[in-house]
Amino acid sequence: MMMKNKVLILFFSALLSSTSYASNVNDFCVADLKGPDSLSGYPCLPPTTLTDDNFVFNLQPANTSQFPTIKAGISTAFVNEFPALNGLDISVAHVAFEKDGFFPMHSHPDATELIILVEGEITAGFVTGMNSIAYLKTLKPGDLMVIPPGHLHFVANSGNEKATGFATFSSSNPTIHSFNNIFANNVPSDILAQATFLDIAQVKKLKARFGGSN
Amino acid sequence: MMMKNKVLILFFSALLSSTSYASNVNDFCVADLKGPDSLSGYPCLPPTTLTDDNFVFNLQPANTSQFPTIKAGISTAFVNEFPALNGLDISVAHVAFEKDGFFPMHSHPDATELIILVEGEITAGFVTGMNSIAYLKTLKPGDLMVIPPGHLHFVANSGNEKATGFATFSSSNPTIHSFNNIFANNVPSDILAQATFLDIAQVKKLKARFGGSN
Amino acid sequence: MMMKNKVLILFFSALLSSTSYASNVNDFCVADLKGPDSLSGYPCLPPTTLTDDNFVFNLQPANTSQFPTIKAGISTAFVNEFPALNGLDISVAHVAFEKDGFFPMHSHPDATELIILVEGEITAGFVTGMNSIAYLKTLKPGDLMVIPPGHLHFVANSGNEKATGFATFSSSNPTIHSFNNIFANNVPSDILAQATFLDIAQVKKLKARFGGSN
Amino acid sequence: MMMKNKVLILFFSALLSSTSYASNVNDFCVADLKGPDSLSGYPCLPPTTLTDDNFVFNLQPANTSQFPTIKAGISTAFVNEFPALNGLDISVAHVAFEKDGFFPMHSHPDATELIILVEGEITAGFVTGMNSIAYLKTLKPGDLMVIPPGHLHFVANSGNEKATGFATFSSSNPTIHSFNNIFANNVPSDILAQATFLDIAQVKKLKARFGGSN
Amino acid sequence: MMMKNKVLILFFSALLSSTSYASNVNDFCVADLKGPDSLSGYPCLPPTTLTDDNFVFNLQPANTSQFPTIKAGISTAFVNEFPALNGLDISVAHVAFEKDGFFPMHSHPDATELIILVEGEITAGFVTGMNSIAYLKTLKPGDLMVIPPGHLHFVANSGNEKATGFATFSSSNPTIHSFNNIFANNVPSDILAQATFLDIAQVKKLKARFGGSN
Amino acid sequence: MMMKNKVLILFFSALLSSTSYASNVNDFCVADLKGPDSLSGYPCLPPTTLTDDNFVFNLQPANTSQFPTIKAGISTAFVNEFPALNGLDISVAHVAFEKDGFFPMHSHPDATELIILVEGEITAGFVTGMNSIAYLKTLKPGDLMVIPPGHLHFVANSGNEKATGFATFSSSNPTIHSFNNIFANNVPSDILAQATFLDIAQVKKLKARFGGSN
């Protein structure tokens, strides 16, 4: 009789499963990175192909030898590395800075960033549109700092030791818009100088550094 | 001259139609269930293939012989049955309970549920995260009860007669997460017992009933 | 010893409750109808003042003597009648039509409507922007029809008996924009005649009927 | 050494680019109009195929000889004409009216309209669901008028000269639902007369004008 | 008898009005600028206090003598100037540039910008995060250019005459984040120099110009 | 002359600031916890009152002596502790487990959870609605696991040492719905037993433990 109960309840389960097939797909949607991308992200892998491993990702520690010029490194778990994040509005990176290391001014148009400092000391700041205010703080381990979406910000190791932490984001795929991108293209130097109020010599120097021309 | 007006206005109409082709697709988007699913639902059937019948669905009455163990039945009009609901944020099910019938504890992660009792008497309840409060009411015909998204809830026939009604949802595809699903898999019984504060014998008994192992 | 467990776990519970106070408010937000309204709805009643009764509402049957001219009635459970629906994206009305009763052409700018016919026979239709198509169907008990947001539609009793059913909406407060509102104001008749392609005599006749002037 | 800096920074750039590939697609998504449409719009053209030209569109002036009956014209830059607008929640049309020209009563279910009058004089109005109020104003060059989503509205040249301006929308693809569409189909005239409170002769007259039957 | 019809229909109208009071508020919500601001905008003025004038705003032409340094001017119709836009996801500004006038590099974190050039010639460009690409175009009257949300962009008069046009936005309150804000505060010059790759002398020069210190 | 430039540009800045006042509030909105809560969160503190400190929060390490029964602790930075997170769709908690410590089965209706294991070994699992599948993994330091919104899940220390990590969420205020809440109220034991398929003795035992009655 237990058997009968089991069978009947499972039938109930089966019916709900079949009617709720697409719902589960909407509950989560592990990205099929080969599918066409769209504004709402990638199409979903078929739920029946998923295993435990799809929901776990090993985030390697950031390596400060990755970018010697800025003495910093970043290791990301965004949707392209961890497809289960597709559409779930969250992602994370591990970041590391040697002494004097830093991340230059950049913004994430679509994502809040929440910094978690684990070791060392960093100074981070962001600039707002209102009254040209900059909010700037030196963080110790355990300190968090929040950067609103689309705000230009930077992070610098302000201590004497290595600094490491996590940068978490409110998007599965936070775009990184580096300020120095504006020098890495062929926009004429005089136009850039006008648009940025920089001296033209400064613009040309940075164009040379970041691979721009004109 | 009427004719001329007609032709000219129809030309106007045609232009608007051609420029607004995709708009109409966005106004509604009858699901192509064969298309790849995504976080925003299914792709749309071509508007030109649609007929009156696409917008109507016959919802069969729920049959309480469907699930003898719980003496209840459910008949759903979710997006998989009624593809015109795709993305329109609404769906409905007919539900029926024999005397002593019930729907066990479950939740809908993405959808509000609004219960409409048509006949009989039911008692429904949901549990909130705050202060462990449960809201519990006995409903008579004409009574509505609202269950917030993601809240564990149950419904039981508390009268002496059959009870029937509608469950409406704020999603075209409300997922049904039954509490008893946690016993229908191969998670080791000792881990489940710890995670639920249940006695291990109780866990094993329910694993047997719902087809779980370990 | 049970006592000790209980106390400790409750402490855990208390902590989570205090940290999640506002979360619960966001899970649901029973409207304080006296508060200032905003684009995201009403402010919330304090969670500690809520009881079981807040989540239940008795929907009276619609009475066709309510609007003798159209031989129809409507009984609504929208946010103003049932404040627990605030922000939960769902609401419902009971509707009833005598023989020859109908609801005139109208739209709901922000809400999908899903019609559930319970008894009798109705004919319902909506008009799309694309190619001037109208989708029109006669419904029998158990039939559902979906009206996309913002589409002009009407419902008429097309049988020989009373017809009743439910209209469910994907908004807690679906606006009703009746086509005849365009005659119930002081916009000059000649302007209205031009804008609608109606004869001016027809415009004046309807202005008289619906309380408009000019 | 500059060279070394440049190479290293570019490597950093390259890494960020590869990890943020899909992010950029989400930042903007130029429509592939051949792709299947969905509720969230078209799939994206591959970012590597985009050029400067994708982000610019020449909006031709509206021509009032386009629709002689209403002495008006419209030239649109919606997603089908300007695919870069896909999902960016904005679009624009140029509109022109000869003396006595007008746009008949219509609505945009999914979009706010913001009218910018550039030359001439127009009178525009919209009707709300609440208390049958119509808001009606005569505009001079430089005046703006806002029409909430889904509200029936019209625009008429109320001056003695040509009038031109822009209609901007909060959607990349604002649907145009013309009131006269309700006469351009085969819904029986008696049903339409009942649903609109119009005289049946008026309905038949408009059916003849707009190509409807029955 | 007409009278009777009128009375009855108006009663129907009154009922719908009372039940849909809050709906209309949600259809549109003219900002009460004195109310507390929130993430979803301002609270609404009471609908009964609204008149035709609330929905119309006179946008003055931009005056290039407004900012002599950049030989440009801007006249805005954002929510603070035109409160009816509150929450309707659209706004507009008139912009004007003398010969050699320009708007310096800036971004709008929450809004797409769609530029409509009316007279003269401008060159506009934006920089993307991916592969450091800049999209740059010279526009003639009638040309549109779209700037995705959060992307750094600039506009310069590249012709020999005055240039004027409209900038429309997908937000009722598009924030303007000027790149030069990063020099208008007290962030130490050496930190800024590091974060931007600029020479420290350049940083100090711009700090002096834009009112920053340190 | 530089001075003149400075003054003029600052005037430009001031104008933009005044027109964009509310925009900045929308860019971020530090919660006024005393204000009325709403579905879109708390009202904003006046921007002019904000300092650097508003954007930083010190997250204390979790202390496993906090909940001796489950040998675990949690330290949260949700909106009530860190008001700058208001509406920014992100938050974080530090979690710690002694040997044999665990967090019992619970869900977060509105938030994705992304677990970052820093030290030790944990086993975490979640149950889906589809086919009763449970996804279960043992994590090592550096491993991430993602839990979709609204899914019942648990975490247990499965190693021989203390385990610590971060739980990040896609909401500024993730609600914690513990499964054991269903025993901490006055719902009659027989109703609960029916709704959960548990033996009534088991229900009564857990009611006693978690403070429920009936």
Image (tube, coloured by chain):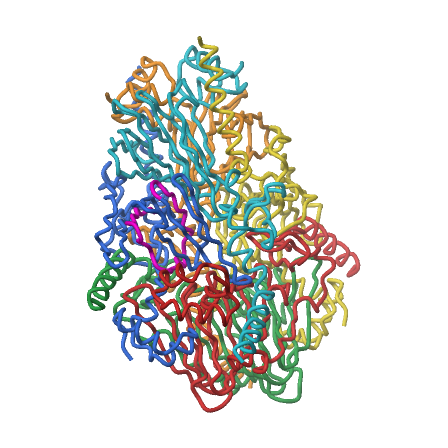
Chain colours: A blue, B orange, C yellow, D green, E red, F cyan
Q: What stretch is highlighted in magenta?
A: A91-120
For residue D186, say whether it is visible.
Answer: no
Q: Does the magenta stretch include residue A106?
A: yes
Where does the image place residue E109, in percent across and percent down from the top left? 46, 61
Residue F165 picture location, percent across and down: 34, 34
Q: In which quarter of the image is the N terminus of chain F?
A: bottom right
Residue F121 appears left or right of C58? left
Depth check, front residue: F176 or F46: F46
In front here: C27 or D22? D22
Does residue D43 show up? yes
**Magenta span main SS:** strand
Q: Give the image location of residue E53, x and y in percent.
A: 70, 69
**Residue depicted at 32% across the width and 39% down the height:** F146
Decide: is E113 above or below B108.
below
Residue C175: say if magenta.
no
Q: Nearer the viewer, residue F75 or B208?
A: F75
Measuring 31% from the left and 50% from the top, which residue is drawn there? B37
| Quadrant of res D193 | bottom right
In the image, E98 versus F107, the foreground residue is E98
Image position, residue F167 (x, y; %): 37, 37
Left or right for B98, reference A15: right
At 48% across and 84% down in the image, what residue appears? D61
